[in-house]
């Protein structure tokens, strides 16, 4: 038995064939597909190991906090108890006392069902998800400027014809290695790759030009490039006149970012700035891509906007093999932000504050628009409010591990401990699940049908190979079971194809319109790009070709003003800490820390430190070093490298215990997107001698 499906991890969603073998193990093979060309990375190759992992949960677990004991419990009994507790809490404190926290790795059907469950079963506004920590700044900026947030505006195979790729703050060679083939295809055709990153990463090593700005100065860099292409007369005046609004204001502000000033802010020499501006200014087809570097800042939306302004000035969006793109990270980061698990959103990328959207979706759900709650709060604000007098007293977590992935993580863990009820659905006992009153064991990728939407906006099929172990059910079964017990029978479906059909109806007329798609229409093709509206003959691989989905059909230049990072360096905390992912691990590590082959590649947390900084702290390779911020401390092994700036250190965020870097990260939020400033905080280093560094599984 074999099925064609996709990797459970990142947003590239590499295609793979899974074969159930005679000894019940599952063989993984890369499958030819436009995104991965048959390739997989280490994480993909080893993904099937988790299906038979000894760490797998196969029964719900109930923890009695008063007795301090945990024990397996049956699904029905657990759902009865959870429903009773939810009813009691809501009767006492009101509907908003129960919150939902979702995940960017959940299928479209699960993300849609979570949003629906929150609004019509619980009646709560308090729902958000971990995608808020991923690409929310780029999403907000794209919506504001371009009228639509689709990570890539064209199939990634178009990159082969791109002359200049400007990649800002992304390390695809480690986070999604098969993506590199598209950059190399561009280079093979004479294209240039320019990488902007404070670290000389594996991706930077592939670049024709690599520039290492001071962390948090990306916006000044973008404004400096805009200044230069304007000064050199390289903007596309026809495009600006016919396809955009607002250029004059932006032009006048860019005048203040002359190259010498930008060099002082960013540390990028004037000659390098001019070199990149000249490349972009002369090219016909360029792509400006942002990833978490510029996005995970307290000014992330405006920073991304500055890059979109540059793309618009050059006339790129809508031109072949050109435009602005955001590299989404999580497996269903794109679809997960379209169908209702965001605090402010209804399916189809509709606003929950829009009366027409409320009417439409309420009709699909068979409820009144008046009964739908309004917008809630963004992820960190939600987590920060847990257990407070005005905050939720209960939370249900699906496909997320905020105890590791949220900023100021120790504080978040303390807030979760203050809840009266914490329920977690996960295949494994993540750090968040370990704190829960009830844990429900749920299916993994090879055990379920569904759809995912990759970083191009391509909707693809996840296909079931095998039944889950006895005792394991789908998140969809949990939602339906709770809905029944909470007195909303029949509202929540459990069959993915039926949910996808309903999602299509709910999305009809929205920005992310899936209404012409079904499991059947997705068969026999390499997925379908949204929007694909009912009655239209085909999907939309390329957007913005003729017009933008704004009221006047034009893109908007948005005037943005550079501002400092939230936590500048000072005498007490004189070093920048930046964080990110490594090749062998994925997100909070709930899955990948359980795969020995991946753990063997990089077994423990490490801290990248420049030799000069290491010398200043008397650190040698492998020494344990304590990183201290205003929020706490984390420990890693010293890794001395010239690939990082002298004023900056790097840690990955996959680890728990003493190696959990989010203990020290800054929860300063972007005012529009709610994105925390993961990418920069001020720290100091202390050498430690006696602590053994290790991850806790
Ligand atoms: Fe999976 Fe991403 Fe690796 Fe592809 S690049 S195999 S989707 S983790």
Image: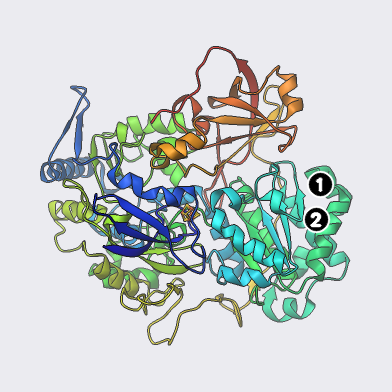
Q: In which quarter of the image is residue 312?
A: bottom right
What residue lies at 81% left-to-right and 64% top-to-bottom? 279
Tell me: residue 10, above or below residue 507: above
- Residue nearest the viewer, comparing 562 with 68: 68
Residue in the foreground of this view, choosing between 5 and 124: 5
Give the answer, above or below, for where 263 lies relative to 359: above
Q: Distance between the residues labelled 2 and 1?
A: 10 Å
On the image, the x and y values in percent for residue 385 come to 40, 38
Would you identify the image quadrant in which residue 633 lies?
top right
- Assign a secondary structure to mark 2: helix
Q: Report if the beta carbon of the residue with label 1 is closer than 8 angstroms to ligand 1.
A: no
| Relative image position of residue 48 (x, y in whole percent) | 35, 50
Residue contact between numbered discs 2 and 1, judged by CB atoms under 8 Å: yes
Q: Residue furthest top?
A: 690
In depth, the one of 266 and 56 nearer the eye is: 56
Q: Is residue 682 above or below residue 526?
A: above
Say which of marks 2 and 1 sits in front.
Answer: 1
Q: How crowded is mark 2: few (under 14 residues within 10 Å), some or many (20 or more)?
A: many
Name the residue at 19% across, 44% down. Answer: 91
- For label 1, the residue is 268
* Disc with the residue nearer the chain's start (2 vs 1): 2
Of the 4 image quadrants, the one containing the C terminus is top left
Q: In this view, does 580 lie to the left or right of 93?
A: right
Residue placed under numbered mark 2 in the picture = 224
Q: At 39% from the left edge and 63% from the top edge, which residue is drawn?
A: 452
Residue 172 position, x and y percent, is 59, 53
Q: Is mark 1 on a helix, strand or loop?
A: loop
Q: Is residue 569 visible?
A: yes
Q: Is residue 268 left or right of residue 614?
A: right
User: Which of the image's four quarters has the N terminus?
Assistant: bottom left
Q: Name the one closer to the observer, 476 or 348.
A: 476
């Amino acid at each position: 038995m074999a099925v064609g499906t996709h990797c459970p991890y990142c947003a590239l969603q590499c295609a793979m064939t899974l074969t159930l073998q005679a000894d019940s193990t599952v063989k993984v093979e890369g499958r030819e597909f436009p995104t991965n060309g048959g390739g997989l990375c280490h994480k993909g190759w080893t993904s099937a190991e988790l299906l038979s992992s000894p760490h797998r949960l196969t029964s719900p677990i109930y923890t009695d906090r008063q007795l301090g004991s945990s024990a397996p419990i049956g699904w029905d009994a657990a759902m009865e108890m959870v429903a009773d507790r939810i009813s009691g809490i809501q009767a006492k404190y009101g509907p908003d006392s129960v919150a939902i926290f979702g995940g960017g790795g959940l299928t479209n059907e699960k993300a849609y069902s979570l949003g629906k469950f929150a609004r019509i079963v619980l009646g709560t506004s308090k729902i958000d998800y971990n995608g808020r920590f991923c690409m929310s700044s780029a999403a907000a900026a794209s919506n504001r400027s371009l009228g639509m947030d689709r990570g890539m505006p064209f199939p990634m195979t178009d990159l082969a014809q791109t002359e200049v790729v400007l990649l800002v703050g992304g390390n695809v060679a480690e986070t999604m290695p098969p993506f590199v083939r598209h950059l190399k295809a561009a280079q093979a055709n004479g294209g240039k790759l320019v990488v902007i990153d404070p670290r000389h990463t594996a991706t930077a090593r592939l670049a024709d030009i690599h520039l290492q700005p001071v962390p948090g100065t990306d916006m000044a860099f973008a404004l400096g490039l805009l200044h230069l292409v304007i000064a050199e007369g390289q903007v596309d005046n026809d495009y600006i006149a016919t396809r955009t609004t607002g250029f004059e204001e932006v032009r006048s502000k860019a005048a203040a970012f002359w190259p010498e000033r930008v060099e002082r802010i960013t540390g990028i020499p004037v000659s390098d700035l001019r070199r990149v501006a000249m490349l972009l200014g002369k090219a016909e087809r360029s792509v400006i891509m942002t990833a978490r570097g510029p996005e995970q800042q307290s000014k992330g939306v405006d920073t991304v906007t500055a890059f979109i302004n540059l793309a618009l000035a050059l006339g790129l969006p809508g031109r072949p093999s050109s435009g602005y793109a955001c590299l989404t990270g999580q497996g269903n980061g794109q679809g997960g932000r379209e169908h209702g698990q965001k605090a402010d959103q209804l399916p189809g990328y509709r606003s929950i504050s829009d009366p027409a959207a409320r009417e439409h979706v309420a009709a699909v759900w068979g409820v009144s628009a008046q009964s739908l709650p309004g917008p809630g709060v963004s992820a960190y604000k939600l987590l920060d409010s847990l257990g407070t007098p005005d905050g939720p007293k209960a939370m249900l977590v699906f496909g997320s591990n905020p105890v590791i992935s949220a900023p100021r993580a120790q504080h978040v863990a303390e807030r979760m401990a203050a809840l009266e009820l914490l329920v977690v659905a996960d295949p494994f006992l993540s750090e968040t699940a370990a704190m829960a009153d009830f844990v429900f064991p749920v299916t993994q990728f090879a055990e379920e049908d569904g759809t995912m939407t990759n970083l191009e906006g391509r909707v693809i099929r996840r296909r079931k190979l095998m039944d889950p172990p006895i005792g394991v059910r789908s998140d969809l079964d949990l939602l339906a079971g709770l809905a029944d017990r909470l007195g909303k029978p029949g509202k929540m479906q459990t069959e993915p194809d039926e949910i996808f059909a309903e999602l299509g109806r709910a999305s009809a007329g929205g920005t992310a319109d899936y209404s012409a798609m079904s499991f059947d229409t997705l068969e026999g093709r390499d997925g379908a790009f949204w929007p694909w509206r009912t009655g239209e003959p085909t999907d939309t691989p390329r957007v913005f070709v003729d017009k933008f989905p704004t009221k006047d059909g034009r893109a908007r230049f948005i005037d943005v003003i550079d501002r400092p990072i939230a936590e500048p360096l000072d005498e007490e905390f004189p070093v920048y800490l930046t964080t990110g992912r490594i090749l062998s691990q994925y997100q909070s590590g709930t899955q990948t820390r359980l795969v020995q082959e991946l753990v063997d590649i990089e077994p423990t947390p490490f801290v990248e430190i420049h030799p000069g900084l290491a010398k200043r702290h008397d650190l040698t390779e492998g020494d344990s070093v304590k990183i201290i911020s205003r929020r706490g401390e984390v420990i890693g092994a010293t890794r001395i490298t010239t690939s990082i700036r002298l004023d900056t250190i790097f840690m990955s965020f996959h680890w728990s215990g003493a190696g959990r870097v989010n203990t020290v990260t800054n929860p300063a939020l972007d005012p529009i997107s709610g994105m925390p400033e993961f990418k920069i905080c001020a720290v100091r280093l202390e050498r430690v001698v006696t602590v053994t560094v290790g991850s806790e599984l």
